[in-house]
Amino acid sequence: MLRQAMWAISISCLGGGLIATATAVAAPAVESAHAEPSRGELVNESGRLRMLAERMGKAYAQIALNVMPDKAREQMAQSQKRFEDNLRFVARGANTPELKSQLQAVTTAYRSYALALTVPPTRDSVALAHRQTEQVVADADRLTAAFDAHAQGGTAKIVNISGRERMLSQRLARLYFAAALSGNNKSDIEKYRIEFKNALVTLEGAPLSSPEIKRELELAKTQWLFFDQAMQGIGDTASNIRNVATTSERLLETMDNITAMYSNSLKYLVGALPAWIASGIA
């Protein structure tokens, strides 16, 4: 009990005095505290909940593996703070019974998940927490889909696709770490590898992908190669795990930048076009 309490204290204290190194944990950007969030922003920030849940689970497993544990604790604390900020942000756009119900489901699942993450990480506690990761991500995905459906003409779809890539960078690393802890094979990883690669192709061909976005996508493709190579490393050595940890974070940062670029493009472009044109943008 004392050990569990000390672990909880260490996690809660990490939120102060640390500087976030990636845009993935920056505060939601809006024009003012009372501005109505745009459709792209709501899909972006609700979709970010999926990634943050995966990032927490990844960090929790990484601590159990004792690979860069201090960095993992920092990432977990940052992700928890951002998750809670995002719940408040998307609540401003949850203006229908369906959206409110979906948001409540995410909030309830997250409360149980946050409690599970206060337990000192072991192979068994990681397995339990990761089952809750899946629930939070599933609920957040439904919330994101609901916001996407409320976006006129489906114009926020491209933001959802890009945001899911952001999440997959963390899910793949989490599953890799879970397999390293349990000694199981990594068969579950393959379908998400394929999904990530296919979505990159979709993003490249999207009409909203400006030259600036395409340059970022080229960077993401390069980072994906390094990340994929790290996951294909022979054996679950500390070196391989460290490489997966670092390359997944770099890929996350780039995909987060790309998602923000799509969100901003929609915010300023869609509002200036007739609905029948806007519906074909994404």
Image: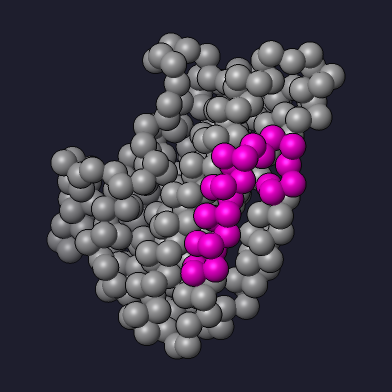
Front in this rendered view, residue 38 or 46? 38
For the view shown, which residue lies furthest in the right direction? Answer: 276
Front in this rendered view, residue 64 or 154? 154
Q: Position of residue 3 (x, y in %)?
A: 17, 63
Q: Residue 180 appears in which quarter of the rendering? A: bottom left
Q: Is residue 50 visible?
A: no
Principal secondary structure, stretch drawn in magenta: helix
Q: Position of residue 146 (x, y in %)?
A: 68, 32
Could you tell me which residue is drawn at 34 percent across and 56 percent down?
117
Q: Is residue 71 above or below residue 127?
A: above
Front in this rendered view, residue 84 or 266? 266
Image-based side of 113 in relation to 209, left or right:
left
Could you tell me which residue is drawn at 55 percent across and 68 percent down?
225
Q: Is residue 142 above or below residue 233?
A: above
> In the rendered structure, which segment of residues is drawn in magenta?
203-227
Q: Position of residue 262 (x, y in %)?
A: 60, 34
Could you tell me which residue is drawn at 56 percent across and 27 percent down?
264
Asked if residue 207 is among those painted magenta in the image, a careful observer would answer yes
Q: Position of residue 55 (x, y in %)?
A: 43, 54
Q: State the quadrant of the C terminus.
A: top right
